[in-house]
Image (spheres, grey):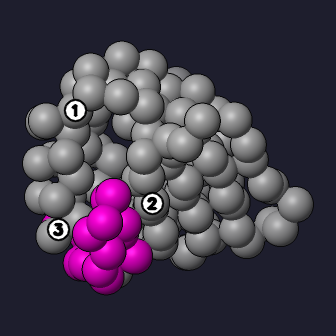
Amino acid sequence: MTKLLCIFLLCMPVISTASCIGGDPIAATAELIKKVNIHDFAKTFASSIDLTILDQEDVYSAAQAEIVLEGFFKNNAVKSVTIIHKVTSNPNVRFAVFNVVTANGTYRTSVSLKLTEGQFLVNELRIETKKD
C-alpha cells in the first residue's frame, strides 16, 4: 500500500501538468468569467497583460489587471457567457471570442492565451460593446 501511495505522489505533478495542457483553457476562461471569479481568473494571467475595457486600454501587471477587472464586473453583473469563436490551430496559442451578457448589456470579449511553462496564460483581454 505504501509503495502504491509513493508512486501516486510521484506521478501527481505529471498528471497535473498534462491536464493543464490537455484541458480546454478557453472553456475554463469562459467559466471563470461566467462565475465572476476574477481572483482565480487572475491566476491564469501572464505577468503582464494587454487589457482593453471599452475605451480604456493599457498594459497591466497581473495584479493591476485583476483590480481593473474586479471594478468592471462589480458594475456589470454577468448573466451568461457564450463562446462564439475559438482558434486552436496553433499548439502554443489559443484565441476566443465570447458574448458576455451582463445586467447592463452584452459585451464582445476576446481573449488570447499563450502557452508558457506548460500552461496557457492570458496575455490579452478585450471587452468591447457589442455592435449588432
Disc 3 is placed on an element classified as helix
State yes or no: residue 132 in magenta.
no
Disc 1 is placed on an element classified as loop
Residue 126 disc label: 2
Q: Earlier in the sequence, mark 2 or mark 1?
A: 1
- Of residues 23 and 62, the one nearer the viewer is 62
Tag 3 residue = 63
- Of residues 45 and 129, the one nearer the viewer is 129
Disc 2 is placed on an element classified as strand
Q: Which of marks 2 and 3 is nearer the N terminus?
A: 3
Apparent side of residue 126 relative to residue 14 in the rendered image (left or right): left
Residues at badges 2 and 3 in contact (C-beta under 8 Å)?
no
Q: Which amino acid does label 3 sit on?
A: Ala
Apparent side of residue 57 relative to residue 21 in the rendered image (left or right): left
Image position of 93 with respect to 27: above or below: below
Part of the protein shown in magenta: 49-63
What distance separates the C-alpha of mark 2 from that of mark 1?
Answer: 15 Å
Binning the other alpha carbons within 10 Å of mark 3 as few (below 14), some (14 to 19) or many (20 upward) gives: some
